[in-house]
Image (spheres, coloured by chain):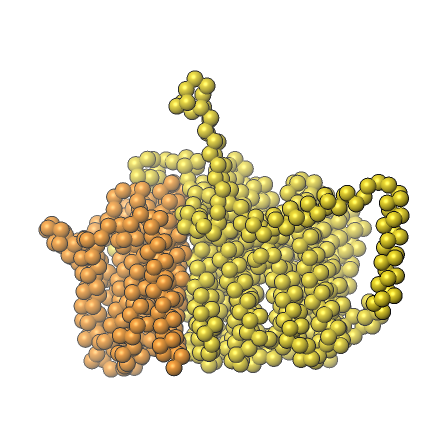
Chain colours: A yellow, B orange
């Protein structure tokens, strides 16, 4: 008997109890009680996920829960992977969130609304992968969107930008819902059933055109949730404006579900498809990875930077999923399994480091009230633990060896490089370009996190608030420490995931590759020879560091370190204002990618009245707008606003007119019924 | 096998570590002679290192652990890479770990650490150097990985010893269009990674044009010695990697002792020739403007892309 239903029921109970507690309890008790119950949701949801990864499967139909359709649930290893990730993130972030909201006043994250929504949002994050019918999936999906929307709006009293972000998020997530609804309705109508098993069985009945339409509709919605261009505009608005624990949940658990939906629908329910679907996904992923990380490079708002980096990492995952689909459509199933394993591993790794990064950014924000990197700096001496944890997360994010992100990007590159065995000119053109785009985004990601860490945490404070920062309270540190343990484990022994990852890949019908296995420390590819053992790399690096420092000390004459002023090429003791800021750090990259980014620069020189040569004031403005948003959304919004204005003329205010509309409507309806039916 | 293998690994590390200052001295000497100067002699970098090691270690005010740790990390990444790359032998105990992507990433890790150290000082020059170095590093990455892609196609692996021994046994591969294009692309990438002319001028004294040197301006004494050694080792290693990939002859492929000394001598000769060529070229080249560097790198990226395309259409499609 599987333990999954019992654990899931526990999660639901804890989530409900947490919501009630958040609503009923007074402020003092609300945050700890709801926080602990949310952590319980995370633990039990994660446990259910792990149980599914270990191999237990469970499915059930609960007819009474929803009217008409009932609720269908099923847990397989693919769902289990996403549940386990969401559960782990929820647990750590809930612990962090107790510290974050405590002592912060009854507004913001400590408010009744937020504390009621948080456990429910956490619960939906765990439950979305469990849904096994279109209606249950869409209900949970919408609950998740609403929960996160409420939480994004938490600080709406403090900043007007929060309200704006909320509107963007609400509109875009519901556009996504409409697309999903249309896609799934079409699919279910043609396949003759709305449970996932009926869809799976009926997928082959669909004509290729309908299948393609379903895929495009659904993929648009899911890639929007995952933050890929062009429907990414909500992400860099909503994630930074949400309270940091919520940002962490959204960036590390919610966006994953976009990938889950895509894998579930595209590879599992629709059973793969023609190559053009997946080549399209590869193109979207590639463009979005580079675009996202470039915007991150330009951002000087720490949380906006992290949000764009989420967009980039999810795009890398989409590249993996796309490659997997391409290989499936050409019939190379082991390679497809490898690419999918790389994508799923990157989901896990990204969740670990991005949750930590958002939490660390939240600590900085809570302590200093600053998100602007240009004003931060010098935090490593005031907040050493937070700085260290951020550095650990950044190491994961830059995809360099001891970090966990490197392992999944390495696997992704391996699957792309060896994809050239697959015949077809399209593949031969797309794969090298994908490799180049992955490499370029990895290179820029290194620059991005050098900027975030070096400008934000190192050097000296550029603002009073940064200079008087204090270390985060113990509970916040504890939550971050949980995530840090996860990162270290993933970086050193990714093999722990091995069998679970294979089962998750196997859940969509691809053969297990054993890519991450073998004594638990090795990443090995079965059909292609290449191996990477992270533990070995770390051991070798440690030994080499000891060797280098040892030899340097051996040959050095004087051991004692002396303190001295900064030399600065004889300039001596520079002030913090002279240090490089995030904006200046990004300037060369901005120049290089001038044509892509199209920065706007405005210099106003006001001369004194007596002479045009004497300057009284210079005003310099610089902005790097999101160009896709600029070019794509603005015209649409303008047309919509114009249509709205035009529609006002229909409402002239005369009752006769309105009665006339009603009459005309009735006549048209009757005519349609008479003629059409 | 294992004793020979361990000896080969140790030899690689020692040769790169001890030979790197000599290579730099040799290149400076070649350059000096070509410019009509007497030169300071091949051993000068060693003397410099000794001088720096005898100085007092300095901690500039306001710097933190990142600044302190970066020099050792820079040297350590290069040492690990030197142990992995088959400079003397392809049959070593670590050859199964010698993945080309890992080596590239290790070198990038050194750059990452040094850029953080540059920002850690909080000076304008440190930030300037870090910003420029990361920009160049980001743009080099696609070229390098595409070259890796092109190189891995014939052998079906990114394992360097396998690529090198494959090429040694089948020299025709090297003269193929793909091989030549990948060589050219990788050579430009190596110039950029090691901060040589035309990307960066290692002997510049003008702060405003510096890239690599600007990051390390605040280092003094033993720390500076480590930074310089790290940079020199990185040059040696990358030239060695180029020679291993494209002129693989002489590298020991078996488990016997005899080929090792030959490999050592040949490695020295190959790297010395490459260094001399580079030094001679630097006499005639000028450093390009920073914002022209992307054009150079875009060119090399194109070469790498052509290499992949060539190897696909000329070999793979048949």
- Closer to the camera, A606 or B110? A606
Quadrant of the frame with the N terminus of chain B: bottom left
Number of labelled discs?
Answer: 0
> Where is residue A106 drawn, in percent x and y?
72, 43
Q: Is residue A63 above or below residue A142?
A: below
- Closer to the camera, A562 or A633? A633
Q: Residue at x 85, y 50 (%)?
A: A661
- Left or right: residue B116 versus residue B28 is right
Q: Residue at x 51, y 47 (%)?
A: A299
Residue B147 figure quarter: bottom left
> Where is residue B270 drawn, in percent x and y?
20, 68
> Where is residue A355 drawn, in percent x and y?
58, 57
Q: Residue at x 69, y 62 (%)?
A: A179
> Could one spot residue A511 in this view of the protein?
yes
Quadrant of the frame with the C terminus of chain B: bottom left
- Left or right: residue A180 versus residue A350 is right
Q: Is residue B272 above or below residue A459?
A: below
> Residue most toward the top?
A610
> Could one spot residue A343 in this view of the protein?
no
Q: Residue at x 31, y 42 (%)?
A: B208
Q: Is residue B8 above or below residue B57?
A: below
> Where is residue B38 drawn, in percent x and y?
10, 51
């Amino acid at each position: 008997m599987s333990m999954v239903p019992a654990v899931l029921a526990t999660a639901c109970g804890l989530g409900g109890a947490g919501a009630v507690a958040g609503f009923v309890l007074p402020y003092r008790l609300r945050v700890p009680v709801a926080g602990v119950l949310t952590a319980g949701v995370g633990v039990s949801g994660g446990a259910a996920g792990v149980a599914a990864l270990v191999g237990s499967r469970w499915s059930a139909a609960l007819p009474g829960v929803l009217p008409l359709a009932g609720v269908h649930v099923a847990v397989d290893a693919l769902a289990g992977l996403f549940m386990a990730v969401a559960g782990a993130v929820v647990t750590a972030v809930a612990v962090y969130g107790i510290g974050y909201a405590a002592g912060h006043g009854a507004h913001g994250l400590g408010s009744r609304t937020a504390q009621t929504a948080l456990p429910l949002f956490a619960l939906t994050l765990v439950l979305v992968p469990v849904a096994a019918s279109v209606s249950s999936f869409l209900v949970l999906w919408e609950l998740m969107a609403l929960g996160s929307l409420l939480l994004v709006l938490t600080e709406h009293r403090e900043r007007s930008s929060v309200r704006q972000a909320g509107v963007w998020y609400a509109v875009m997530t519901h556009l996504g819902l409409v697309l999903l609804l249309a896609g799934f309705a079409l699919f279910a109508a043609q396949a003759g059933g709305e449970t996932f098993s009926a869809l799976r069985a009926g997928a082959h009945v669909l004509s290729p055109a309908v299948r393609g339409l379903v895929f495009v509709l659904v993929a648009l919605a899911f890639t929007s949730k995952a933050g890929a261009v062009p429907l990414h505009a909500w992400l860099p608005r909503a994630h930074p404006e949400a309270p940091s624990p919520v940002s962490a949940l959204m960036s590390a658990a919610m966006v994953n579900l976009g990938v889950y939906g895509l894998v579930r629908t595209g590879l599992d329910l629709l059973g793969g498809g023609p190559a053009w679907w997946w080549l399209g996904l590869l193109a979207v992923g590639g463009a979005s990875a580079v675009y996202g990380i470039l915007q991150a490079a330009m951002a000087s708002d720490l949380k906006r930077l992290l949000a764009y980096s989420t967009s980039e990492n999810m795009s890398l995952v989409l590249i993996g999923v796309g490659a997997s689909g391409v290989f499936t459509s050409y019939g190379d199933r082991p390679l497809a399994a490898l690419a999918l394993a790389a994508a799923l591993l990157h989901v896990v790794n990204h969740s670990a480091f991005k949750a930590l990064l958002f939490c660390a950014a939240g600590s900085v924000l809570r302590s200093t009230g600053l998100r602007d990197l240009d004003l931060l700096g010098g935090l490593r001496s005031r907040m050493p633990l937070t700085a260290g944890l951020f550095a650990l997360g950044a190491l994961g994010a830059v995809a360099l060896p001891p970090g966990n992100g490197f392992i999944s990007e390495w696997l992704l590159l391996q699957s792309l490089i060896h994809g050239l065995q697959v015949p077809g000119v399209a593949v031969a053109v797309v794969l090298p370009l994908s490799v180049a785009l992955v490499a370029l985004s990895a290179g820029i990601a290194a620059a991005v996190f050098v900027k975030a860490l070096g400008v934000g945490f190192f050097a000296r404070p550029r603002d009073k608030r940064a200079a008087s920062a204090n270390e985060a309270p113990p509970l916040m540190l504890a939550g971050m420490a949980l995530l840090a343990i996860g990162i270290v484990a993933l970086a050193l022994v990714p093999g722990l995931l091995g069998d679970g990852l294979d089962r998750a890949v196997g859940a969509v019908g691809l053969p297990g590759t054993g890519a991450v296995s073998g004594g638990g420390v090795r990443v090995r590819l079965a059909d292609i020879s290449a191996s990477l053992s992270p533990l070995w790399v770390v051991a070798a690096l440690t030994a080499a560091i000891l060797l280098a420092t040892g030899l340097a000390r051996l040959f050095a004459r004087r051991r004692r370190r002396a303190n001295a002023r900064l030399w600065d090429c004889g300039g001596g003791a520079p002030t913090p204002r002279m240090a490089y800021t995030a904006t200046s750090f990004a300037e060369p990259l901005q120049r290089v990618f001038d044509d892509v980014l199209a920065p706007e620069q405005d210099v106003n020189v006001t001369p004194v009245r007596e002479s045009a040569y004497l300057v009284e004031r210079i005003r310099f403005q610089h902005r790097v707008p999101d160009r896709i948003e600029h070019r794509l959304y603005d015209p649409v919004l303008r047309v919509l606003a114009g249509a709205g204005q035009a529609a006002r003329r229909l409402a002239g205010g005369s009752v006769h007119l309105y009665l006339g509309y009603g009459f005309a409507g009735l006549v048209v309806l009757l005519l349609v019924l008479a003629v059409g039916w | 096998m294992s004793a020979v293998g361990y000896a080969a690994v140790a030899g690689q590390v020692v040769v790169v570590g001890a030979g790197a200052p000599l290579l730099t001295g040799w290149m400076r000497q070649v350059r000096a002679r070509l410019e009509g100067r007497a030169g300071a002699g091949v051993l000068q970098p060693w003397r410099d290192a000794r001088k720096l090691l005898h100085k007092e270690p300095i901690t500039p005010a306001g710097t933190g652990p990142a600044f302190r740790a970066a020099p050792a990390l820079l040297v350590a990444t290069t040492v690990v890479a030197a142990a992995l790359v088959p400079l003397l032998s392809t049959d070593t105990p670590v050859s199964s770990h010698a993945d080309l992507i890992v080596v590239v990433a290790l070198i990038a890790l050194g750059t990452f650490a040094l850029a953080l150290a540059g920002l850690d000082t909080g000076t304008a020059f440190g930030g300037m150097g870090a910003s420029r170095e990361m920009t160049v590093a980001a743009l080099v990455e696609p070229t390098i990985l595409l070259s890796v892609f092109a190189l891995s196609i014939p052998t079906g692996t990114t394992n360097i010893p396998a690529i090198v021994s494959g090429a040694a046994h089948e020299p025709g591969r090297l003269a193929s269009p793909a091989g030549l294009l990948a060589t050219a692309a990788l050579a430009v990438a190596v110039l950029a990674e090691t901060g040589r002319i035309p990307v960066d001028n290692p002997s510049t004294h003008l702060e405003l044009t510096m890239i690599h040197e600007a990051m390390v301006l605040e280092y003094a004494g033993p720390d500076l010695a480590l930074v310089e050694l790290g940079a020199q080792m990185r040059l040696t290693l990358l030239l060695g990697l180029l020679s291993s990939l494209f002129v693989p002859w002489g590298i020991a492929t078996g488990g016997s002792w005899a080929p090792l000394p030959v490999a050592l001598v040949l490695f020295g000769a190959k790297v010395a020739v490459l260094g001399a060529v580079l030094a001679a070229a630097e006499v005639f080249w000028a450093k390009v403007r920073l914002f022209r560097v992307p054009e150079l790198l875009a060119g090399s990226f194109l070469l790498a892309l052509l290499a992949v395309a060539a190897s696909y259409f000329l070999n793979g499609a048949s």
